[in-house]
Amino acid sequence: MHVIEKPAYMQERAGARWRNKPPCYKCEGSAADIVGMLSCNLLKDMFLRIIVLALSVEGEDLFCKLWGNPDIPLLSKTGEFMLGGIFTLHNNIIASKPTLQSKPEAFTCIGLNYRGYQFAEAMIFAIEEINNRTDILPNVSLGYKIYDACGTISLAIKAAMALISGAGEAQSSTLSCSQQSSIHAIIGESASSPTIGIATLVGQFNIPVISHFATCACLSNRKEFPSFFRTIPSDYYQSRALAQLVKHFRWTWVGTIRSDNDYGNSGMATFIEVAQKEGICIEYSEVIYRTNPRETFLKTVEVIKMASSKIIVAFASFIDMEFLMKELLLQNITGLQWVGSESWVSAKNVATKENYRICKGAIGFSNANAAMPGLKEFLLSAHPSSTPGNTGLIQFWENIFDCSFNNTTSKICTGSENLQQVNNLYTDVSELRITYNVYKAVYAVAYALHDLLACQDNQGPCTANQKDALPLQALQYLQKVNFSANNGEYVNFDINGDPPARYELVNWQLSINGIIEFVTIGFYDASLPEGKQFIMKNKSIVWANNDNKIPKSVCSESCHPGTRKATQRGKPICCFDCLPCAEGEISNNTDAVHCMKCPLEYRANEEKDQCILKDIEFLSYDEIMGMILIIFALLGASLTSVVTVVFFKFKDTPIVKANNSELSFLLLFSLTLCFLCSLTFIGEPTQWSCMLRHTAFGITFVLCISCVLGKTIVVLMAFRATVPGSKIMKCFGPTQQRLSVLSLTLLQTLTCIIWLVKYPPLPHKNMNSNKEVIILECEMGSAIAFYLVLGYIGVLAVMCFVLAFLARKLPDNFNEAKFITFSMLVFCAVWITFIPSYISSPGKYTVAVEVFAILASSFGLLLCIFVPKCYIVLLKPDRNSKKHVIGKMQSKSL
């Protein structure tokens, strides 16, 4: 197979962009390189299918010619079942610049990753432990091949292709194209983006991939990643847990930082989506990545400095956070509360004493810590040797002790150096949260293979011996794995290859020895019912601020009860103004969005946070105004009674007789009723009082005006009768006077009866005139009837006024027309001014105005008509004689 050589000089960029622009690889002669180059084309799937078909051809043994040396694993050991491992043993690469005249040089990995080496050694530790056990895979040995991804996607995929093709196994320059891969499962990678590349490629060959640290929720897609599993929960749950954590502490104004890769972009997208549903606003969202220029990090630092939010949610890898921490330290940005994802919040290489100044009291979710007995001794027993498959340990040894086995120009490694004296992330076993995931991943594969070899008919695919076992069969059994780890944790996978989502909430706290401890302050278990998934422990929490109190981070202070939130234009919903509720509305919750209207019978209190019963208002006997009106009503009735007694005592005197004593007594009786009917307007309205007050008022006043009208007509008739031959007095004698008063009063009475029968006045709670009180009043029932009653009284009053005005020049001692004219003038003036006052007076003052009008008009009639007569009767008896009356009349007629 001959392939045209193409240089590979693409600069590695992690993130979601990898899928759209897959990295290209140089073709150096291995089958892995050939497939890697073909995967750069748009027809990748078609070529992969062709390769699989070629590998399955029977009867013809094709050979793939290698153009270069095969990729050799850094750590390897032969076994009957082989497991592949891909870890980031170095943090970065140095890529040579292509000349286009020769084959590009291989990448050089730099920056030893002690944590990655611990992961690799944990895999070897688990394999050796299983090989020494008799209950799992008895009489079967596990081997391994571990490659270095150097923190890049391209080398991770290249390592996966080497594991699939079996490169490094043959010493010749040719490989059998039909040879089956000896790898039954691959453990790795740590980051999500390279794991996506590995799972996409390896899934075509049905080889299981189990990651210990790739948390991107996108990897749960079984259609795209059919053979992917992981022993760490998906970020689908972690993102929601972080949102619930932020909500728990009532932080509504946060900044976010994420890694520019699949892990950061996917996790932060889910967090923002859930957070916004919970009412949390994002002030800024910054992106960081380890290969970005320093100016990009400085820009992010400047955004953090200028922001008003005190909470930063960082969904980033620990390597990216290390770069950001350096810049934050240089500018001494402290006092901010950091909320982190599991990638960095429990990473020892980030949790340094220097970084504690920046991230004091940081909190975040992490996998549960676990103990791995014997791992410490196993890590310290590692030693380089000339044994094949030990290349990685040689590089590790040279780096950690700063020596060389081959280079004579520097310090020579003797091999007697002691790892017991080394204290770094490789030897530190206090935090094995992620390392334990590697351990579980190896055991999951071992149990799957064990079940495959021990299977029975009709219980799944079976194999006679380990040589016949295929990765596809291991994949099927891996889906059903369910075992208990040495710490009691149950290990299993759901239909998406994910484990149960359980997290510990950890808090950065500084110990007495100056070491940062990850203190567990809470838990999150996605398997529990909603509302009970997030549990806080009763432990003291260290916060970033100096007073060690829960920090506040809001765009706007909370709106107190009695106010509502009004969003500021052009800003997130967390930025708002607090507006007081309108009249008659309340809000009894903090940060209320809307004010609620009080029920009709209730009003808002002064604070507008509670509805209270409205005061009931009516003109009562107990208040001063009611008492004053009662006093005047009783005074008027008493005066009327006194006048009646005086008139009765002096009924035979000329002045009483001359003024029609019968109508005078009837008028005094009606005036007494007018004064007393005003009392029906005072007090709480009832059905009977409402029916009585207006009808009694209408009938008594008509009776009163009818009497006055009769007296006026009598005066006019009396002087007409003095004309010789006049018989007019016979037409309006006592009988006619009584009938006129009776008929006029009966007409008003008939109107009131119809009113009461058809549309009776009833008590009514007036809640519209005054929003603060309930006015108890009498509803008219029929406004037409009310105006007919008032209009009828007005017509009679006008007639009296006109007739009295015409008779005003008749003799004084006999004539009371002047007094009737004046009384009617007062009466009309009172009731004309009553109309606007009645309409404009609020509440109980409306009733008070009506009572005042009744009393004023009644007093006007009493005082104007009867006081002058009482004055003469009581104080000027000499003028109360027939001689005086006749003499005065004659003098006037001359």
Image (tube, grey):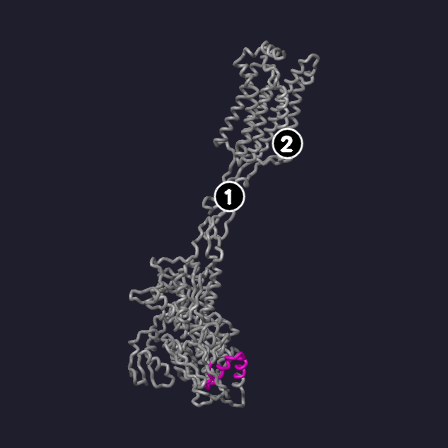
Give me the disc on residue 379.
none
Residue 122 shows up from this direction: no
Which residue is at the front of the view, 830 or 472? 830
Which is in the foreground here, disc 2 or disc 1?
2
Describe the element under mark 2 as helix, strand or loop: helix
Q: Residue furthest top?
A: 883
Segment tinted magenta in the rendering: 25-51
Q: Are marks 2 and 1 in contact (CB under 8 Å)?
A: no
Type of the residue with mark 2: Leu
Q: 10 Å neighbourhood of mark 1: few (<14), some, or many (≥20)?
A: many
Q: Quadrant of residue 763?
A: top right
Residue 841 at x, y percent in the picture: 54, 35
Give me the disc on residue 602.
1
Type of the residue with mark 1: Tyr
For the C terminus, the quadrant is: top right
Measure the C-alpha gap from mark 2 to mark 1: 36 Å
Residue 131 shows up from this direction: yes
Residue tagged 2: 788
Above or below 878: residue 259:
below
Residue 369 at x, y percent in the picture: 38, 69
Is residue 217 magenta-colored? Answer: no
**Measuring 46% from the left and 54% from the top, which residue is drawn there?**
576
Which residue is at the front of the view, 209 or 2? 2
Which residue is at the front of the view, 310 or 398? 310
Describe the element under mark 1 as helix, strand or loop: strand
Residue 292 at x, y percent in the picture: 42, 71
Above or below 837: residue 271:
below
Is residue 40 magenta-colored? Answer: yes
